[in-house]
Each structure stands twice: as C-alpha cells, then as structure tokens.
Image (cartoon, rainbow, N blue to C red):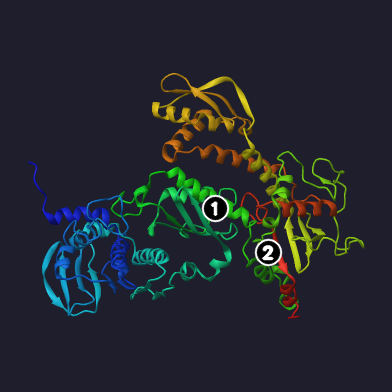
Amino acid sequence: MRVHQLPETLINQIAAGEVIERPASVVKELVENALDAGARRIEIATAAGGKTLIRVIDDGRGMDAEDLSLAVRRHCTSKIDQRLDDIRTLGFRGEALPSIGSVARLSIRSRPQDAPHANEVSLAGGVPVPLKPAAANPGTTVEVRDLFFATPARLKFLKSDRAETAAITELVRRIAIAFPSVRFTLSGPDRSTLELAATGDDRLARIAQVLGKEFAANTIALDALRDDVGLTGYIGLPTWNKGNSLAQYAFVNGRPVQDKQILSAIRAAYSDTLPRGRYPVAVLWITLDPALVDVNVHPAKADVRFRDPGLVRGLIIGAIRQSLLAEGDRASPSAGAGLAQAFRRPETFHPASAGGAYPTQPRNDGFANRLSGNDWQAATSPSRPLHDPAAGFSDLDQPDLASASAPSARMDADERSDTGVEHPLGAVRTQIHENYIVAQTRDGLVIVDQHAAHERLVFERFKTALKAGKLASQILLLPEIVDLPEDDCDRLADRAQELAELGLVLERFGPGAIAVRETPSMLGETDVAGLVRDLADEIAEWDSADGLRDRLEAVASTMACHGSVRSGRRLVSEEMNALLREMERTPGSGQCNHGRPTYIELKLADIEKLFSRR
C-alpha cells in the first residue's frame, strides 16, 4: 500500500483514542471549555454513566455562527495563537469537540450574550450536519449521545454504569475545587443530584462542600514561595488520613492535574508520620510562570512537566514538613468526642462487650509550637537519654525497675496535688495495664501510650542526627564495583559529595562502573549494588537522591521502635512525668513514627456529660 492521506473522520477517531478514554473524559473536556468561556454556572446531566447521554449547559460567552462551524473542526481554537509557552487556559489543542463527534452523536447549541438567537451544529460519527438556527438561552449547550457507537470496540473497555458515574462525580468535584466562584450542578437518573454553590474567593468553603465540614478543623494552611514558584493550600493532620490517595488534589496555575511528581512529593513529606497503607489529605495550588511548566505532555492534559522538577518537589516537601512542625502536630479535634462515645453507662454495660477498643486518635493543642527554639535544641541530642532534669529520669541511668511496683490509683499527698497540671500534658496520676499513662490536666485528662510516645522521641533524635551533618560510615574491606550505564555513572559522580554526607562514599571506576568504598553504618549489611542502582534511577527521574535518606530514616524508625520503653514495663511517677515533659518539648510527638497516635485527651466537659452533669 502506498503512502496516502487518511480520511478526516479516521484522523479524528485516532485522536479520540487519546483524548476520550471514558465518559469522564468527555465531561472534563466540555466543562473545561465552559470555564474557558467564562461560565459562572455549569449544569451537567448524565445517563447510564455517561454512555447514553452527557449534557453540559453553561452561561458563558457563547459562539456565533462562524465560530460554531469552526469549533467542530480539528485544531480550531480561540485559546492560543502562535506559542505554546504561555498557556493560560484549560484547553488549547482544538481536538476535543471533533474527537467526541467522531465517536458519538454530538450537538452544540450556542448563543452569544447579545445575539438574537442561537445556532446549532451537529456531528454523528464524524459526519457533520449543516449549521441551523435554534432557540436557546445565552451560553452554550453541548449534548453527547451514544458514546462510542462509531467505535463499538471501545465500549468493551468501559466499566459498569456505577463505576463510570463515580468517575464523573470525582472529576466534577476536582474541577469544582479549582473554581470556587462557579456553581456546579451534576444530575441524572443514575445519580443523586450534586449541587456545589459558588463560594466566591473562599476556597476553604468550596473544599468543605467537596470533602466535608470536618476539613477545616483537621487541616493546616500552607503558604510558601521559592524562586518565584508559589505553593498555597491545605494539608491534613497526620492523624486525619485516608485509605487511598483520592483526597489529594493538585492544581498547577489553576489546572487540575494528577501528576505523579506532585503525588510523590506529598507522600515523601508524610513519610514518617503515617502508617503503611494510609494516605494524607492535601489540596495544593502551585503557581509559576507558564513558560516554566509544559502542559502539552499528553492530550488528556492531566500530566505536566516542570522545567525544574527538583525545585517543585523540594518546595512541596519542605513546606509541608515545616507546617507540620510549626503546628506542633496538632491532631484531629474529634478525638475527644470519639473517646467519650467509647464509654458505656452502667445501665447499658454488658460484660461480653467490655473488651471494646478505645479510639486511638490523639488530640493536641499545638504545645510544641509554643516552645522556643532553644528549648527544642536542648532536647534533641541524638545520643542523649530521655531525661528530665527536675525528675532525674534517665533511660540509661535509672534504678532497676524490674521489681518496682506500678503506681496505683491511690497516690500519696504530693502526687495528688495540682503540681504539673498546668503543663499541656498535665501531671501523672497513674499507669494502667503497664502501658498507658493517665495524667490530669487543668481541664481534663490525657492517656499516653508509653511505648508509642518514647518511640517517637527516640526517632526524632535519629532524624536530628541525620540532619546534623555527615553520618557515620563503615569502610568496606573490598570496594564494591557496580556496573552501570555511563549516564548513571555521571549522575552519581555529580552527587558524590551529597551522598558522602549520608555515609555512602563512591567514585568513578573506569568507564561504566562505580566503586563504592563506604556505606552508612546504620544500614548494616546491605545490597550495595541494588542501593546504587536505585539511587541512579531516582536521580535520573527526580534529579535528587532522597531515596537514600528515606531508607536511612526507615532504618532509624526500626531502631527507635526497638530502643524505646516497651509495653508492659512498669514506670515510677518520676519517669512518667519526665516522658510527658519530653513529649511537650518534641515536635511531632502527637504520633509515633508508624503513624499511630501517642496520646488521646478527654476534656472535663465531656467527662461531665458522661455523668449527666451537663
């Protein structure tokens, strides 16, 4: 077969394979067009998960007859002219409408604000229907029926109506967060109506509509700037987490994206505060010069490429970690209410149900944030044992506690005094089940998991050591020679100084090889070749070597777990008070390094409610 020009309809169907993956892709393209047209009210209706009907109505600027006839032709757009490095609209490729019309039955009615009537144009499987006058309100109505009827093989790859409906709902929620000044309505026979009223410039109110009213109380505001790249938004408290990453939203210059670089940075920022399998909540807006980001990576426009990905990644990780530190790991304010609900009144108490578990989310008023920098520095020596000068408690230098009796609910006169209740975590009153410390505060009580709390304190010391300077390394008896592509060798050699500060000493060893002479002592016996290859891959993709630091922190986490006060160990009151004071001095003490809470708090008002005193 000789080289020939493909028919226009077939070209559009090929393009549709990239642009239109499922009904949600159609909704995305049509809603983005409406937003680019300045719409302030957008109504979306679907049927059968969008397979049989998708209708989008907006009150935007509308199109006259000439623009409407061009809009359904490939690569016709009003959003760009000559350049691709200054894109300030959601759409710009001019492919969506002809691609949709090539695989479905498409009709568009549009009327400019000052026009006497609307016009309508249609496409059915790529075959156009002549333009004709129509009746419609100002704005544009786009109707898509029988999606993929012209390419029935694509229907086999669609999921159930319920799954496609859920995908459309999630897409609209994501776009709605990016545009709080626009009213969105999503309806149809296969769904309950979703109405998101416009909130103007109040982003937090719009987010609450999408993610729930508890969002504001469980998040921290972000506002950071580095080299003209801005980052704003909200991040969830570590103790308010989810079972998947669907509650992570990212917007680049107002464009909703699902970019793996951004999601990876969010995950890295929470690496030592969440348990395995749990995901943080985050809503982030990144703003930068359009010339510094490429949005023309994929026809679906969900991915972007930053000119300096390391800068953006570092900004996200640094801003999130700094905000968590500044808040003193304030935890979910709903924990106290959950604890109160766990108590049973005598008349409803049944012995068979007495083993019910208490909620485990902590509540924290941000006490670590109120400490001065000197207080924190004095408490963070990585080799220093847990010690309170006033109490004389030391984990390495203390009396033999094996035969010590645990404090009981009956304390002596000094211990029953109010000394210490002014502290954020209060004064110790007793230890129960040889693991939980009960302390009295001015307006309630605190229950501390002694193992989880001490584990976090030890881990923070290890982290401080990691940041303090060059880590201890062990010299290999024989250098490990790792064969790598020349490009990877160059990247590792360029990062040699940075890696040496983490205890990994390497150098070039002829063409296509790296010689490793020292490895971090903390890693012990390790797969040197695998470590070096992983680092080379990471540097190639992210232009950073954070993987080694993450691996060291994972080892430090394990060491902290094994080196902390164990459950079942009886402590005397001086030791327990010292533990509480150390927690108050340590940022991040609200949860252990596995993401579990270290303490919970119950306010006096909640206790009084349990006894019907209020």
3 to 197, vertically: above or below: above
x, y percent for residue 346: 75, 76
Question: Seen in the image, is 540 located left or right of residue 329?
Answer: left
Badge count: 2
The residue carrying mark 2 is: 358
> Badge 1 is on which residue?
320
Query: Where is residue 571 shown, x and y percent of the image?
Result: 82, 51
Q: Are marks 1 and 2 in contact (CB under 8 Å)?
A: no
Mark nearest the camera among 1 and 2 is: 1
Local crowd at mark 1 within 10 Å, few (<14), some, or many (≥20)?
many
Residue placed most toward the observer, 27 or 406 = 27
Q: Is residue 389 left or right of residue 494?
A: right
Asked if residue 472 is positioned above or below residue 134 in the image, the reply reads above
Q: Secondary structure at mark 2?
A: loop
Please state if 83 lies on the left or on the right of 474 as rendered.
left
Left or right of 258, for residue 143: left
**Is residue 252 at all visible to an observer of this figure?**
yes
Q: Picture quarter containing residue 345?
A: bottom right
Q: Residue at x 52, y 47 (%)?
A: 268
- Please tell me in which quadrant of the rendered image residue 175 appears: bottom left
Q: Nearer the viewer, residue 214 or 346?
A: 214
SS assignment at label 1: helix
Q: Quarter of the image containing the N terminus? A: top left
Question: Which is nearer the N-term, disc 1 or disc 2?
Answer: 1
Q: In the image, residue 331 lies at what x, y percent?
A: 63, 61
- Name which residue type carries label 1: Ile
- The amino acid at mark 2 is Tyr
